[in-house]
Amino acid sequence: MLNDRELGRYVQRVDGRWRLDRVIVGGARVLDIQGAPPQRERGQEYVVILISEYFAGVPWLERVYQAANLWDAAEMQGAADVHCYTPGEYGRKRDTLPIVRAVSDYGVDLIPQN
C-alpha cells in the first residue's frame, strides 16, 4: 500500500516552493500494488515526476536536489528518484527517457493533468 498521507504532505511541501501542475508517482512499490510478479528486476522503489511551469529558470540540478530533499524516505519506507520538469521539458523527456514514459503510462497521478 502507498502511504497516501505522506505522499500528500510531500506534494504540499514541494508545492510550497513551486506551484505544481502535475505529480506522477511510479516505481517498484506502485508496480507491486498493480500486481507485478515478485520475480523481476525491481528498479527504484519510487519514481516521482514533478511538473511545474515554475521550474522555468531554475537550474535542473537545483530543482531535483531541493525536491528530493523534501522526500521522507523513512516515512515512505523507500528512496525516490525525483524528476522535475517544466511542461515542455516533460513532453520531450516522455518521448526520450524510458523511465519517464513508463511512469507516465502506469504511474499514479497525484495531481491529474487538466
Image (tube, rainbow, N blue to C red):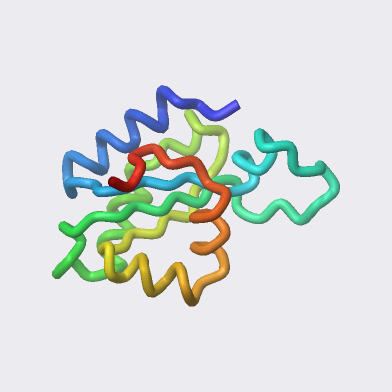
**Horizontal and vertical percent position of residue 30:** 60, 40
Please name whichever residue, 109 or 71, is drawn nearer the observer in this view of the structure: 109
In-image side of 18 versus 111 (left or right): left
Q: Quadrant of residue 52?
A: bottom left
Q: Residue at x 22, y 70 (%)?
A: 59
Q: Nearer the viewer, residue 72 or 106?
A: 106
State the residue at coordinates (16%, 57%).
54
Residue 102 percent across, percent down from the top left:
57, 59
Q: Residue furthest right?
A: 39
Quarter of the image where one finds residue 38: top right
Q: Residue furthest top?
A: 5
Residue 73 horizontal/vertical position (percent): 48, 38
Name above or below for residue 69 compared with residue 75: below
**Percent x, y of residue 106:** 57, 49
For image coordinates 39% across by 37% down, the residue present is 110
Image-quadrant location for residue 35: top right
Between residue 101 and residue 61, name the one nearer to us. Answer: 101
Horizontal arrangement in the rendering, residue 38 relative to residue 29 (left or right)? right
